[in-house]
């Protein structure tokens, strides 16, 4: 089986639509174990840690480009921040989503770019590279996802101030980051049989809280230890004022950046997690609150919490699953066969099959380099969601039964894929264990990635210069 591992996580929010396809994720391995979906990326607010230094801000307008931050020895310029900012603002506008206050968004963009720079430098240090064929495939995939050809896509990007060189550079960076995460994070995430047993046991209960997951964001107005009654009353009044502003529609992330004494990452969001991993006080206060509502202030020993219910969902064990039946021809890339040659050969196979000059199964038996399926005419059998690497599964998801994909590159080589059928099946006990493993793996992967990214950032030297405009 082709294991699904770390999918591409976009640091560039403005390219969500163009770059969101999982085919960009590289460096995924074959394994019988199910894997996880794409982890989320937390965009932290601007903070000044021990390694950071600041320079006095200049009020005079800047006509020329200038450095806004240095990450280790590499600069980030105002023009780079502004280019990224424009993409994000355009994307938010297209989605009809509110744009955060300019100063808040600028800080988040800069912090995101600093995190990205630390990871790209790490990828360079460990010797990761991206070959041109992978970038070309990514370009074609983005175009296909947007239902246009590549020239049309590039013209559309150019009309929004993104030239082809910049676009390819962003693709290259995202592929590198995906490879790095797969190398540094994925191998460290494991799920034991005992954990699967416990998950299945927990999901057998029928209580209302079984399988409930929530994502809360908070503004914490800190009450210092030993505060007088007068100080507590003043801080409570401030917290009530913040809550009123939040209920009136003020941007919650902006309130977090202005008032919160807790983590300001991702607008104060604490992440989608089982409710038993939140303080009981938070769970009780928000139990009946609809998604999007504001709760509080809620008093705790730390201070006054203004809570926003960002998301709530159940993570119960599904009883049915949509399975796919596929077959493929795999050509492995190496000294004797380049990726471009493999893609050309598979494109020829596809043309011959469509013209009824050749048979898929016959070609698979003769040429496929997947020993597990070649003898069976490339047949992979029926599989559940999450069992294929993202780029392979993404290609399958776009096919109707009987259709054949264009060549798809993964870490294992280049594939020609045919979808033979789909069906909805009741999960067997073994399949339930596999689904449970997937769910647990994904949760662990998200946490492991966040910890890894924070550690990498903590080891970097970051010098803040004049703030971006």
Image (cartoon, rainbow, N blue to C red):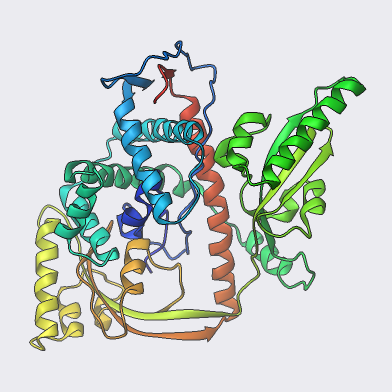
Quarter-wise, where is residue 361 in the image? bottom left
**Which residue corresponds to the image point at 19% horizontal and 78% vertical from the top-left?**
364
Position of 393 relative to 158 (above/below):
below
| Quadrant housing the C terminus | top left
**Is residue 12 at least partly visible in the picture?**
no
Residue 224 at x, y = what percent?
Answer: 80, 22
Residue 9 at x, y = what percent?
Answer: 41, 49
Position of 114 relative to 65 (above/below):
below
**Which residue corresponds to the image point at 43% horizontal and 56% vertical from the top-left?**
95
Answer left or right for 84 relative to 198: left
Answer left or right for 72 relative to 344: right
Q: Nearer the viewer, residue 92 or 452?
A: 92
Residue 423 at x, y = what percent?
Answer: 45, 86
| Quadrant housing the N terminus | bottom left
Q: Nearer the viewer, residue 125 or 162?
A: 162
Q: How many marks?
A: 0
**Is residue 404 at least partly visible in the picture?**
yes
**Which residue corresponds to the image point at 52% horizontal and 28% vertical from the top-left?**
46
Position of 10 relative to 415 (above/below):
above
Residue 150 at x, y = what percent?
Answer: 17, 59
Q: Residue furthest top?
A: 56
Q: Nearer the viewer, residue 242 or 299?
A: 242
Q: Residue furthest bottom?
A: 356
């Amino acid at each position: 089986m082709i294991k699904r591992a770390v999918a591409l996580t976009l640091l560039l929010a403005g390219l969500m639509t163009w770059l969101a396809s999982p085919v960009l994720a590289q460096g995924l391995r074959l394994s019988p174990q199910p894997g996880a979906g794409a982890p989320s990326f937390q965009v932290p607010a601007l903070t000044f840690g021990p390694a950071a230094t600041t320079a006095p801000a200049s009020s005079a307008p800047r006509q020329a480009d200038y450095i806004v931050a240095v990450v280790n020895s590499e600069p980030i310029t105002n023009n780079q921040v502004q280019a990224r900012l424009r993409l994000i603002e355009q994307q938010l506008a297209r989605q009809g989503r509110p744009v955060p206050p300019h100063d808040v968004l600028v800080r988040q963009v800069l912090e995101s770019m600093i995190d990205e720079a630390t990871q790209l430098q790490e990828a360079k240090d460990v010797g990761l590279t991206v070959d041109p064929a992978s970038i070309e495939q990514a370009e074609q995939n983005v175009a296909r996802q947007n239902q246009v050809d590549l020239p049309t896509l590039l013209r559309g990007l150019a009309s929004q101030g993104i030239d082809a060189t910049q676009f390819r550079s962003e693709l290259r960076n995202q592929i590198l980051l995906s490879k790095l995460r797969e190398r540094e994070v994925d191998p460290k995430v494991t799920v034991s049989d005992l954990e699967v047993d416990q998950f299945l046991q927990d999901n057998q209960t029928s209580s209302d809280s079984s399988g409930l997951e929530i994502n809360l964001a908070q503004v914490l107005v800190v009450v210092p230890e030993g505060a007088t009654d007068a100080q507590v009353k003043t801080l409570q009044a401030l917290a009530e004022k913040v809550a009123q502003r939040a209920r009136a529609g003020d941007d919650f992330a902006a309130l977090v950046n202005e008032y919160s004494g807790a983590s300001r990452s991702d607008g104060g969001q604490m992440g989608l997690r089982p409710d038993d991993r939140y303080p009981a006080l938070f769970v009780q206060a928000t139990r009946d609150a609809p998604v999007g509502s504001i709760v509080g202030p809620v008093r705790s020993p730390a201070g006054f919490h203004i809570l926003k219910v960002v998301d709530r969902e159940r993570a119960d064990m599904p009883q049915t699953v949509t399975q796919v039946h596929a077959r493929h021809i795999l050509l492995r890339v190496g000294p004797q066969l380049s990726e471009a040659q493999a893609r050309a050969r598979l494109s020829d196979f596809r043309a011959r099959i469509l013209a009824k000059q050749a048979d898929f199964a016959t070609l698979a038996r003769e040429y496929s380099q997947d020993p597990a399926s070649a003898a069976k005419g490339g047949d992979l059998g029926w599989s559940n969601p999450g069992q294929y690497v993202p780029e392979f599964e993404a290609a399958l998801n776009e096919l109707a039964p009987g259709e054949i994909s264009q060549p798809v590159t993964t870490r294992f080589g280049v594939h020609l894929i045919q979808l033979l059928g789909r069906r909805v099946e009741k999960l067997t006990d073994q399949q339930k264990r596999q689904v449970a493993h997937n769910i647990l793996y994904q949760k662990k992967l998200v946490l492991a990635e966040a910890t890894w990214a924070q550690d990498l950032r903590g080891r970097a030297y970051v010098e803040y210069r004049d703030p971006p405009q």
